[in-house]
Amino acid sequence: MDLFSFCGLDQSGKTTIINKVKEKLGNGVFYYTKEPRIFTSDKIKKIIVPSKLNFLFFLIDRLLHKLKLFKHRNKIIISDRSIVCGIAYAYATKYKFNFHITKFYCNFKKIIPVPHIVFYIVPEFQAENKEFNNTFRTNVKEGYEKVAFSLFPDTVIVKLHNKQDQVEDCINKAIEIITKFK
């Protein structure tokens, strides 16, 4: 199963780029998915507060996702976010992040989907997002670069510099890499 993931800060252009990639590649040998959020949805988080349970639900979400992806194992899978993103965001929240638990997670790599290639979208513009402040965005970026990428040494990280007026360059680069696996 070849798994490609698009990751990056919120509003960096991930979903826009994926939608354009889907439009250009079609379905054929490709299957498109999103990072799972069944048990880690905001509604569940409000009901169940303990972070150890959140981590357990995080693992259950990924295991269920792996089972779903297994049905499409003969296709190239393109995902909007992945475990790499989840770890970067967990790092940014600090109070929920526990490096030892994350190391423990890495022992589950065989049963939880880990992308072969992560397209890390680096925005070359400042997105307006009142929901996240600049400190949080800085912490997410640090989470990617200092923690998440180092936990997955076999995953190839491809940085796509998304300039607002040159998104087509990111799309073409991603397509060029993905189609080599057809």
Image: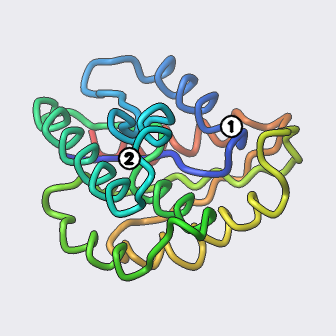
Q: Earlier in the sequence, mark 1 or mark 2?
A: 2
Q: Quadrant of the C terminus?
A: top left
Whole-percent x, y for residue 172 in the image:
59, 37
Whole-percent x, y for residue 84 in the image:
44, 59
Within-10-Å neighbours for mark 2: few <14, some 14–19, many 20+: many
Residue at the farthest bottom position: 100
Residue drawn at x 36%, y 37% is: 36
Within-10-Å neighbours for mark 1: few <14, some 14–19, many 20+: many
Q: Nearer the viewer, residue 109 or 41?
A: 41
Q: Nearer the viewer, residue 182 or 34?
A: 34
Could you tell whether 2 is left or right of 5 in the image?
Answer: left
Q: Disc 2 designates what residue? A: 4
Residue drawn at x 74%, y 59% is: 136
Circle 1 sits in a helix, a strand or a loop, which is it?
Answer: loop
Specify how the rendered protein is coloured: rainbow
Could you tell whether 145 is left or right of 53 in the image?
Answer: right
Amino acid type, label 1: Gly
Q: Are marks 1 and 2 in contact (CB under 8 Å)?
A: no
Instruction: Give the CA separation, mark 1 to mark 2.
Output: 16 Å
Q: Quadrant of residue 14?
A: top right
Whole-percent x, y for residue 67 in the image:
13, 38
Which label belongs to residue 13?
1
Circle 2 sits in a helix, a strand or a loop, which is it?
Answer: strand
Could you tell whether 15 is left or right of 101 in the image?
Answer: right
Amino acid type, label 2: Phe
Residue drawn at x 39%, y 17% is: 26
Could you tell whether 140 is left or right of 5 in the image?
Answer: right
